[in-house]
Image: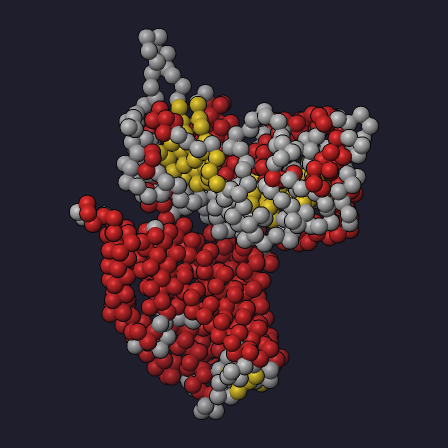
Amino acid sequence: MTSPAGLPPTGGGSGERQRLKLLAVTACPTGIAHTYMAAEKLSQAAERLGVDIKVETQGSIGAENVLTDNDVRTADGVIIAADKDVDLSRFAGKRVVTVGVAEGIHHPERLIEQVRTAPVHGGGGGGTSTSSSTNSGGSGGGKERSIGYKALMNGVSYMIPFVVVGGLLIAISLSLGGHTDPSGGLVIPKDSFWMDVNNIGVIGFQLMVPILSGYIAYAIGDRPALVPGMVGGWIANTGSLYDSEAGAGFIGAIVTGFLAGYLVLWIKKVEVPKFVRPIMPIIVIPIVATTALGLFFIYVIGEPISWVFEHLTDWLGGMTGTSAVLLGAILGLMIAFDMGGPVNKTAFLFGAGLIATGNQEVMGMCAAAIPVMPLGQGLATLIRKRLYTEQERETGLASLFMGLFGISEGAIPFAAARPAQVIPANMLGGAVAGALAGLAGVEDAVPHGGPIVAVLGAVSGVPMFFVAVVIGTVVTALTTVALVDVSERRRKGQPIVDGLAPQPELALAGVSAGAGAGLSVGVGSDGLGAGTGGGTATAHAPAQRTDSAPASAGSAADASPDATADRSADSSAGAPAGASADDEVLSGYLTAQTVKVRLGSGDKEAAIREMAGLLAATGKVTDVEELVAAALRREEQGTTGLGEEIAIPHAKTDAVTAPVVGFARSAEGVEWGSLDGTKAKLVFMISVPEAAAGDEHLRILALLSRKLMDTGFRERLMTAPDEAAVLDVLREIR
């Protein structure tokens, strides 16, 4: 039974007040870095304030230091610092403050004070998202991610693979198997191999909208909401069901996703007989919610969509003969608004329909605007990498490719994630491209858009067509970056961490964001961390530092014979004279051989090359040049300068035979492009083989990320007089 919430308990006869006992849960969806950074900060703050605290960490590597029933029973309050759903039902009757993980990093003392007067959680089930409204009094200034944000991001994350796979397959089939046809745009011969490839891509595109809707609903209403969300999304994207020539597209999917999720939540609250309860989540709720949502969309929402489509077409018909610049701007605005929705389709079909009448200029305006959205959003991810996650940057590259082939849907993930910033930017760029094409009299003889139609000879006025596309793309990218940057700055001056637009997710070179064993390092404004690259790796990083010895030789990281031999070499013949097993730090990956107290290089590339040479002294580097190239490729994705005078260049490459870590110190500092403008004086270089087994490197990075939150530790590392002293300092994180 949960003890009631109240003021901290008081002692017995002595009248001495007992120490406040708190619990905390930290969690971030994209890695282990900020999870452990928040845990360490909360632990440090509690120690300073004389408060007992136990912190459970829930990163992508799983839950560690799990809170027990006894912990909850005796606790005086609970702090949830998370950017993902955390089950609050176990904290019923306790004072609970719920915030984003960034608050746990930047304001731990404030949270400890707030929990004393936080609202009592009623135990209404669900996770942090569903209880956020009731806990607003302890929300730490509104920093918690709202249920809407979390649900939207959930849907977008599941939708992105469908957009990328479908779009790229369509683009490849069009480029290799298509040809221009005045009556059908880019045509692929029926019964050809490339038509089969195209059909597979089309299926991916057809699925992306219901996937978006379904997983938005799932994030809100859990598993019973998945079917109504997906079916609702399919209905939204199928205009023929409600007499519309175009479906509602991704905007309709967002609407059906939220409707399905909240409808399921409402149905769950209905009291039913006990014998009916077991079938509610698998039969009753999905059937009732799916039927109600589907009929509601067809008969209530679908009719206005059909009306909009019809009247927009009539209105555009009345615009012909007016200013070509004005008509081009309007068509560009419409093309860019919903990327496949009724407004976009109205403009596209209007232009396509006029081709048969001999008026090809209107389609020329549309063709110039069509690629601007995916090209502009892809360019934005290259211009300001720090505003985007690793997954978004990869999606941006795919978006660029899709834009070349006139596939505007490549920009949908960005518009769904940040509609208030991306859609206006898209519309501005589309309007500019359409207006310029109209001004120049660009013509398009086929109902398709993008550079591909110009390359295949369907466009007249090709130079001005490309000028319009390029200028529109640049306008879109710059506007997007400006709007996103402004919106992030408005978040009360807080750094962006673990959200959709965090600081650079520093993944190992050669590892994609979805790689299961991917390794990444992230940084907040006052520390750094390490984490998995958004995959499903199962590294086991301890929730609290202990004084135990490093993992044994039987650990996963050292399972291979080669790794065992390398580790033995470090502590015997391969080590410097006088070295012993005690010289090993970070489970032997960093030794006296890989420590340098004075880094001689003055720029980043030279420093990486010098660090690679340092690692080569261990005998674990087979190709120094390839190691340098891999690390530099990683730098091109985004700086590994993490601020606080720290840089962690890293690479996953077969240029090394086993994990190896080096450390060097620069008195003057090396310009590393750190977000806080500081030069890197403490440089760690990490490299692991492509096929590195186990998760030992993740455990080390988790420990390192927590320890580097300690200002005193960094100062000791900076002032250590020689290699031996540096090793002594680094042993603190063993």
Residue at 40% across, 33% down:
79
Q: In this view, does 442 lie above or below 402?
A: below
Q: Nearer the viewer, residue 170 or 526?
A: 170
Within the image, what quadrant is residue 125 found in? top left
> Which color scheme does this rendered protein use?
secondary structure
Give x and y (percent) for residue 87: 37, 40
Determine whether 523 is above or below 265 in the image. Answer: above
Residue at image position (17%, 47%) is 273
- For this orientation, the residue located farthest to the bottom is 357
Asked whether 358 or 40 is in front, the reply is 40
Image-based side of 446 in relation to 584, left or right: left
Pick out the residue farthest to the top.
14
Q: Which residue appears at 30% of the width and 74% of the height?
A: 241
Q: In which quarter of the image is residue 565?
A: top right
Confirm whether residue 283 shows in the render. yes
Q: In which quarter of the image is the C terminus?
A: top right
78 and 226: which is toward the camera: 226
Q: Residue at x 70, y 37 (%)?
A: 564
The percent coordinates of residue 480 (x first, y second) are 51, 60
Is residue 58 depicted above or below 483 in this figure?
above
Residue 707: give x, y in percent of width and height: 59, 31
Q: Quadrant of the N terminus?
A: top left
Q: Position of residue 697 (x, y in %)?
A: 62, 40
Number of numbered discs: 0
Q: Which residue lies furthest to the left in this view?
A: 273
In the displayed orientation, state which residue is furthest to the right.
577
The image quarter containing residue 477 is bottom right
